[in-house]
Amino acid sequence: MDLDLLQEYMNLGLTWIGFGTVTGLAAKAIMPGRDPGGSVATLLMGIVGTLIGCAILQYFYQGETIQPVSIKGFFVGTGGALVILIFYKVLGGYWFEEGETSRWRHQTRRRRRRRRYRSVVED
C-alpha cells in the first residue's frame, strides 16, 4: 500500500472523528436534560447522524452534491444526531416506564428527604 494513500485515509478518518464529535456534542447541547452515553457514543452518534442527514438531503436534492464536512453538512448532521439521540432516549426507557399504566418517568419519581438521626449520649 502506498504511503500517500495511507496518509490520505488517516487524514480522512481523523477528520470524520473530529467532525462527528462536534456534531454529536452540538446535538447533546440542544437536547435538554441528561443524555445517555459517553464520548464514544457521542462520536458514533455524530458520524452516523451526519451520514443519515446527508443521505436524506441528497435524496431530496438529487442534482446537488452534499459535502458532509461543510456548514450544510454540519446542520443536517446535527439534526440527524438529534434524531438518533431522541430514539436512543425513547428506546432506552429514559422518558417512559413499563408497567400496567404508562406514566411519564419524571412524574413517578419523588424526591425523598434523608433524615439525620442524632445519637444521644448520656453520661
Image (tube, helix red, strand yellow):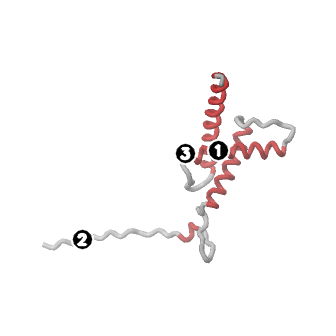
The residue indicated by pointer 2 is 119
Specify the amino acid type for callout 2: Ser
Name the element at disc 1: helix
Q: Residue at x 66, y 31 (%)?
A: 12
Quarter of the image where one finds residue 113: bottom left
Q: Position of residue 111 (x, y in %)?
A: 47, 68
What is the number of the mark on residue 56?
Answer: none
Quarter of the image where one finds residue 25: top right
Q: The C terminus is located in which quarter?
A: bottom left
Distance, label 3 to label 1, CA atoms, is 11 Å
Q: Is 4 in front, or is 59?
A: 4
Name the element at disc 2: loop
Specify the amino acid type for callout 3: Ser
Q: Residue at x 72, y 37 (%)?
A: 68
Distance, label 1 to label 2, CA atoms, is 54 Å
Q: The N terminus is located in which quarter?
A: top right
Q: Is 35 in front, or is 7?
A: 7
Left or right placement of residue 107 versus residue 65 in this view: left
Distance, label 3 to label 2, CA atoms, is 45 Å
Badge 3 density bin: few <14, some 14–19, many ≥20, Cα 10 Å: few
Closer to the eye: label 3 or 2: 3
Q: Position of residue 58 (x, y in %)?
A: 81, 42
Specify the amino acid type for callout 1: Gly
5 lies above or below 100? above
What is the number of the mark on residue 39?
Answer: 3
What is the number of the mark on residue 46?
Answer: 1
